[in-house]
Amino acid sequence: MALAIRAVRCVHPLILALWLLACAQPAQADARLELQVKAAYLVKFAGFVDWPASAFARPDSPLLIGVAGNDALADQLEQVAARRSVGGHPLAVRRLQRGDAPAGLHMLYGAGLDGAALLAGARGLPLLTVSDAADALADTPAGMIRFVVAEERLRFEVALGQVAPSRLRISARLLAAALRVTGAS
């Protein structure tokens, strides 16, 4: 035991710092990959949802994706959504802060307390709401899709009971890809 303690004391601080940095790299890479996958999912979700015609001011209006509570995801989503369109609507990203209204959005990803308040205020709007909050499918009034990690993979669940008041139609193909669908009749 004393030998191990002396060996640790003899480790050069630079080597120790490099070792700690190397241990942190996989966690950072995992977090970056998770953001990339979430951003890709959000863009894909848009292609499997039908919004009522009244949700867009013009046929070529942008499909606006709002992000609350996760600036790193908003950054990644801007990159993924750049120069892409869904149903003739170019994709655009808007960052929301506490107190911002979800008006004009077509999709909203909410994280943390700011996102939970926005999700709750979105009930009945033609707005697809997405979260990764643990209770997004339970009692949160507007959580339609929730990201979950299952078997070390990012997946999603859909709460159809939350979708009905929004007048959105979610494709059966998206529902088939979901890990779980609740509220189906």
Image: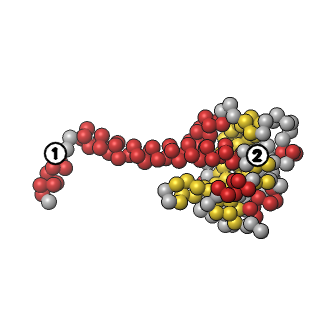
Q: Relative to 49, is 56 above or below?
A: above
Amino acid, disc 2: His
**In what element is the residue under mark 2?**
loop
- Which residue is at a point 64% across and 63% down the rendered structure image? 180
Q: Which mark is residue 112?
A: none
Residue 49, image x, y percentages: 75, 49
Q: Nearer the viewer, mark 1 or mark 2?
A: 2
- Which residue is at a point 86% across and 36% down the rendered structure image? 58
Classed neighbour count for the residue bearing mark 1: other residues with Cα under 10 Å, few (<14), some (14–19), many (≥20): few
Q: Relative to 30, is 162 above or below?
A: below
Q: Return the residue at label 1.
A: 10
- Which residue is at a point 51% across and 44% down the rendered structure image? 33
Name the image quarter holding the N terminus: bottom left
- Which residue is at a point 74% across and 62% down the rendered structure image? 160
Alpha carbon distance from label 1 to label 2: 59 Å
Residue 27, image x, y percentages: 43, 48
Q: Is residue 35 left or right of residue 115?
A: left
Viewer-proximal residue among 176 and 131:
176
Please report whichever mark, 1 or 2, sits nearer to the chain's N-terminal start.
1
Viewer-proximal residue among 69 and 106:
106
Amino acid, disc 1: Cys
Q: Residue furthest top?
A: 83
Q: Are marks 1 and 2 in contact (CB under 8 Å)?
A: no
Residue 114, image x, y percentages: 65, 52
Q: Is residue 47 left or right of residue 36?
A: right
Q: Return the residue at label 2.
A: 106
Residue 5, image x, y percentages: 16, 54
Q: Quadrant of residue 83?
A: top right
Q: Quadrant of residue 61?
A: top right
Name the image quarter holding the C terminus: bottom right
